[in-house]
Image (cartoon, helix red, strand yellow):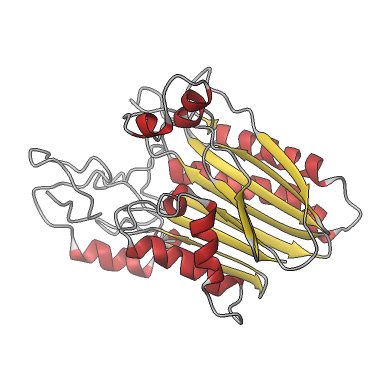
């Protein structure tokens, strides 16, 4: 059964959508959808305004989960060398990814967060993480003499973690607290600093080389690294996509970030920061790099980000898709 409101598959016996809360016994209200299109803050089911929203994120008038449709497709172009796109994809009823990029005399910063769907308010968690990290980095981008990139990224990750913990939690709900992944990339001159928690990734692409710079905080990586089972066996497990670290999340879970600093070599290069909605369709650095390089020579960062996002959509778009591109 397909939910008439959000389009996500549901079990045939369900009376209400597990994803958006809509009734499955009748089609979605046309009036509500029209109102939501005119006002992204309105309820997409009944059209109630922003005042009719509970602490749990559901409409107090009809019970439908409130969705910010303004995040369905976000395109940001700072310059021909720096741009990013976040897209809802084809199967989700809301975009739980978030994106922020900024450039200035002090360099460039790219931040991607991916809200964990099983948690409460994942869209709010990703937005809070991105915004906090961006604010922590904005001053450094405006001032070339700011602190070392590694320390700036550490501060951004700390700010994002605190912001995710501040997202409202509804007690008594059978879901984890608000939770999100994060990856932060900061370039100052030839130096690049990365920081991440979870499985959002950063890739570094040269004309004749490409590498994945981040290492996923995932059950697959940990169990394979331990030597207990092979990668092929691990990918068959129902835990294959389970995270071992995230911002927020269940008590006693790890939020410890990883960081990496490196210098760019001479010549042109490209940095891609993305969520798993993209890399699930391009699982290795070589395939992602091939798609980036296949674009016309005159293509700017926005065109290359669009190519990446549309590639994922063309192959099913089962998750939200976010890609940010920095051409150096």
| Res. 50 image quadrant | bottom left
Is residue 161 toward the left or the right of residue 265 in the image? left
Q: Residue at x 79, y 42 (%)?
A: 150
Give the x, y percent position of residue 2.
15, 52
Above/below status of 298 relative to 160: below
Q: Residue at x 69, y 45 (%)?
A: 194
The answer to whether one can see residue 43 in this image is yes
Judge by depth and name the residue closer to the eye, 292 or 209.
Answer: 209
Give the x, y percent position of residue 117.
39, 39
| Res. 119 image quadrant | top left
Give the x, y percent position of residue 180.
51, 39
Judge by depth and name the residue closer to the eye, 33 or 125.
Answer: 125
Q: How many marks?
A: 0
Which residue sits furthest right? 145
Q: Quadrant of the C terminus?
A: bottom right
| Res. 15 image quadrant | top left
Give the x, y percent position of residue 200.
53, 45
């Amino acid at each position: 059964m397909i939910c008439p409101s959000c389009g996500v598959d549901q079990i045939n016996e369900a009376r209400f959508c597990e994803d958006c809360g809509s009734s499955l016994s009748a089609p979605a209200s046309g009036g509500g959808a029209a109102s939501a299109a005119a006002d992204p803050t309105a309820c997409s089911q009944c059209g109630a305004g922003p005042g009719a929203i509970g602490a749990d994120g559901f409409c107090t008038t009809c019970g439908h989960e409130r969705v910010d449709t303004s995040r369905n497709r976000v395109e940001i172009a700072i310059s021909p060398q720096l741009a990013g796109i976040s897209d809802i994809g084809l199967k989700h009823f809301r975009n739980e990814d978030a994106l922020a990029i900024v450039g200035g005399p002090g360099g460039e910063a790219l931040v991607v967060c991916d809200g964990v769907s099983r948690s409460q308010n994942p869209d709010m968690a990703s937005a809070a993480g991105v915004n906090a990290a961006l604010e922590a980095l904005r001053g450094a981008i405006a001032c070339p003499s700011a602190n070392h990139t590694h320390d700036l990224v550490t501060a951004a990750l700390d700010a994002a973690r605190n912001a995710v913990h501040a997202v409202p939690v509804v007690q008594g709900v059978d879901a984890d607290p608000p939770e999100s992944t994060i990856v932060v990339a900061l370039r100052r001159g030839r130096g690049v600093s990365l920081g991440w928690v979870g499985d959002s990734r950063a890739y570094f692409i040269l004309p004749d080389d490409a590498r994945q710079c981040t290492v996923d905080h995932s059950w697959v990586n940990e169990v394979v690294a331990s030597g207990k089972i092979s990668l092929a066996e691990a990918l068959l497990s129902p835990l294959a996509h389970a995270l071992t670290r995230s911002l927020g999340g269940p008590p006693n879970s790890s939020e410890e970030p990883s960081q990496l600093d490196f210098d760019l070599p001479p010549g042109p290069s490209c940095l891609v920061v993305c969520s798993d909605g993209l890399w699930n369709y391009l699982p290795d650095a070589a395939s992602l790099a091939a798609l980036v390089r296949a674009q016309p020579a005159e293509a700017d960062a926005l065109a290359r980000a669009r190519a990446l996002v549309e590639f994922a959509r063309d192959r099913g778009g089962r998750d939200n898709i976010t890609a940010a591109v920095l051409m150096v």
